[in-house]
Image (cartoon, helix red, strand yellow):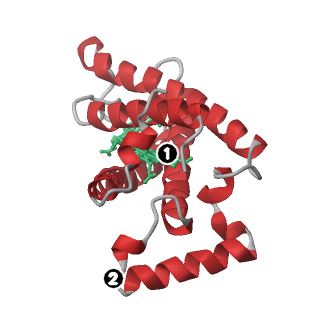
Amino acid sequence: MAYSRTTRILHSLIALTITFQLIVSLVMEPPKVDRPMSQASAFWFEWHEWVGLAAMAVLLVSWIYRLANFKREGQAKLFPWVNAAGRKGLMTELRMFLTLKWKALPDTGPLAGTIHGLGLLIATAMAVTGSILYIGLWPDNIVTANVNNMMDVHSTLATVMWVYLYGHIIIASWHQFVGHGSITKMFSWR
Ligand code: HEM
Ligand code: HEM
């Protein structure tokens, strides 16, 4: 199955912004309860804020597009478990996975779709908690108890996002390698 042009463009924007966010989080110095922001340490954190808000906007457009096209071919595949036929397909593929019939697993089946759907949910949860942090920190970057708690949620989700990104790239490369052409299909600009 080829992905629609809109899906491919939105996916590239999501991949770029989320990967940027994860990498920049390694070098930025966010405000802390006992450490007010200095001008110098604010630079990369400000990038994190702006790109995070951009990611939120891209994800919002993605969700509107997904929900508007839910019934059309391919679009419902991210959440196959919402109906009985999808749940049955998912169980069949799970059994194939557990019995190591990996090569027979399609790249666009209910199992891959479910994982992709979870990835979209984690990215959205990061963007939503980040946007709440943006509002909570505005205008002086003071870390209150509530903001601190939200930072803990945001950081916990970050670990899951890293695991998803690594797993997603490894499995996409594997599908490409066994001949499903996943990367070619997703990043083709026709
Ligand atoms: C999709 C969007 C976003 C992603 C993927 C993301 C990702 C991350 C990651 C990976 C960390 C490091 C967590 C850690 O190592 O503990 C982090 C920390 C942080 N992010 Fe974001 N972020 C996003 C949006 C935002 C936005 C819009 C803000 C706005 C203020 C924000 C504020 C923060 C803050 C304050 C921290 C520090 C948390 C702490 O150290 O406890 N993030 N983010
Ligand atoms: C953390 C950021 C990312 C998120 C949240 C994400 C999310 C998604 C989602 C939701 C899909 C399914 C699209 C659909 O079925 O409509 C997908 C597919 C895909 N993604 Fe990502 N993606 C991310 C980063 C990446 C990166 C960096 C690459 C580069 C290798 C990549 C490669 C692919 C490929 C090749 C597919 C097609 C899968 C297939 O047909 O086997 N993604 N991704």
Asked which secondary structure carries label 1, the reply is helix
- State the image coordinates of residue 173 (x, y, percent, origin top left): 28, 52
Residue at label 2? 100
Asked which secondary structure carries label 2, the reply is loop
Q: Tag count in the figure?
A: 2
Confirm or reject: label 1 Cβ below 8 Å from ligand 2.
Answer: yes
Task: Answer with left or right where residue 107 lies relative to residue 27.
Answer: right
56 vs 171, nearest the viewer: 171
What amino acid type is highlighted by mark number 1?
Answer: Ala
In this view, the residue farthest toward the top is: 39
Disc 2 residue crowd, few under 14, some 14–19, many 20+, Cα 10 Å: few
Asked if residue 56 shows in the view, the reply is: no
- State the image coordinates of residue 18 (x, y, percent, origin top left): 41, 36
How far separated are the C-alphas under marks 1 and 2? 29 Å
- State the image coordinates of residue 60 (x, y, percent, origin top left): 64, 34
Q: Is residue 178 above or below residue 92?
A: above
Give the residue at x 67% y 71%. Answer: 86
Give the residue at x 24% y 14%. Answer: 40
- State the image coordinates of residue 83 (x, y, percent, origin top left): 74, 71
**Could you say which disc has been placed on residue 123 in the image?**
1
